[in-house]
Image: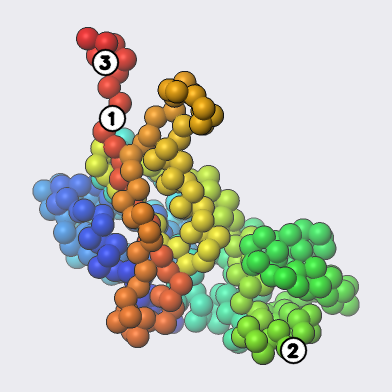
Amino acid sequence: MEFAHIPVLFEETIENLNIRPDGIYVDGTLGGAGHSHEIAKRLTNGGRLIGIDQDLDAIAAATKHLEEYKDRVTIVHDNYEHIPEILRDLGIDRVNGILLDLGVSSYQLDNPERGFSYNTDEPLDMRMDRESAVSARTIVNTYDEAELTRILRDYGEERFAARIAANIVKEREKAPLETTGQLVKIIRASIPMKMQEKYGNPCKRTFQAIRIACNRELDVLQDSISSLIDLLLPGGRIAIITFHSLEDRIVKNAFKTAENPCICPPVFPVCVCGRKPKGHVVTKKPIVPSEEELKRNKRAASSKLRVFEKGPDPVPQEEALK
């Protein structure tokens, strides 16, 4: 199966990265290199692109797609949480731009082997990195009821989390759960038909929750944003595309904190905590797909783009006192 993924918010993302021909850019979620192909195309004069993905299928597809620009592209099989270490190993201190296009690719959703979809009966997997030890099968068969409830509630915002978790535990006592079809039956049996008819396919929230837990998606995002901003050169930008409210909230809050990190009580006349702004939020409101894009790609419907720009380097104290 060919790795096909339509890049969402394509023009808006490229425009907001302010690509310099001689700049260094990192695509931390390379996928099929939809965005990265355009970035690489615009690089000349020593410009460089580092593409990172934890999915080996994506790595293979991106390598092929970026073949004509291989003189300026470095592709790495890893998770974007390790960007600081990857850049250090490449001898790069700071970069002009970073892109994260979060979520699941169309290829991953549509490939029966990957177990991301609730529309077909597939082996329970959901790993973006297929070398990872933890799969969806691990989660549904070994996590205790309380932890399953927490995952479904916190990552899927599922109102029937406790009931679904209890039924998962009950069913796995008979035999281990092996397929997405088995999980779908449990979910449908756990949610009142009235709710299913009113809110559409009841499996979406549970599958999202298990996928997020399997790939540590929110933890990695939460822990990475601040350090990624620190890797930017003055005027450099980080652009993050999210696909659900949990991701978007993390990005929004992280950017807000980077813009205004002061933790002094409001009654203090001046800041004494010493925390300095790292730059400013470019997108006060997230950029969302146009109606034209939504007609072309329904999967773009929930996508949001937020952008942060790094400020000037702080003046050393001894120079400031001159």
State the scheme by which the image is colored. Answer: rainbow
Q: Disc 1 vs disc 2: Cβ atoms closer than 8 Å?
A: no
* Image coordinates for residue 279, horizontal then vertical, percent: 33, 39
Q: Position of residue 124 (x, y in %)?
A: 66, 74
Q: Quadrant of the N terminus?
A: bottom left
Tell me the residue that label 3 is attached to. 320
Residue pointed to by mark 1: 313
Side (left or right) of 198 relative to 185: left
**Front residue of 98 and 78:** 98
Answer yes or no: do the residues labelled 3 and 1 have beta carbons within 8 Å? Answer: no
Residue located at (72% from left, 70% from top): 159
Residue type pointed to by label 1: Asp
Q: Residue at x 42, y 46 (%)?
A: 255
Q: In terms of sequence position, does the residue under pointer 2 or pointer 3 come before the other?
A: 2
Q: Is residue 185 left or right of residue 20?
A: right
Q: Secondary structure at mark 1?
A: loop
Residue 284 sits in which quadrant?
bottom left
Q: Which mark is residue 193?
A: 2
Q: Amino acid at mark 3?
A: Ala
Q: Marks 3 and 1, how far apart in space?
A: 12 Å
Say whether residue 197 is left or right of residue 22: right
Pointer 3 or 1: first along the chain: 1
Viewer-closest of 241 and 274:
274
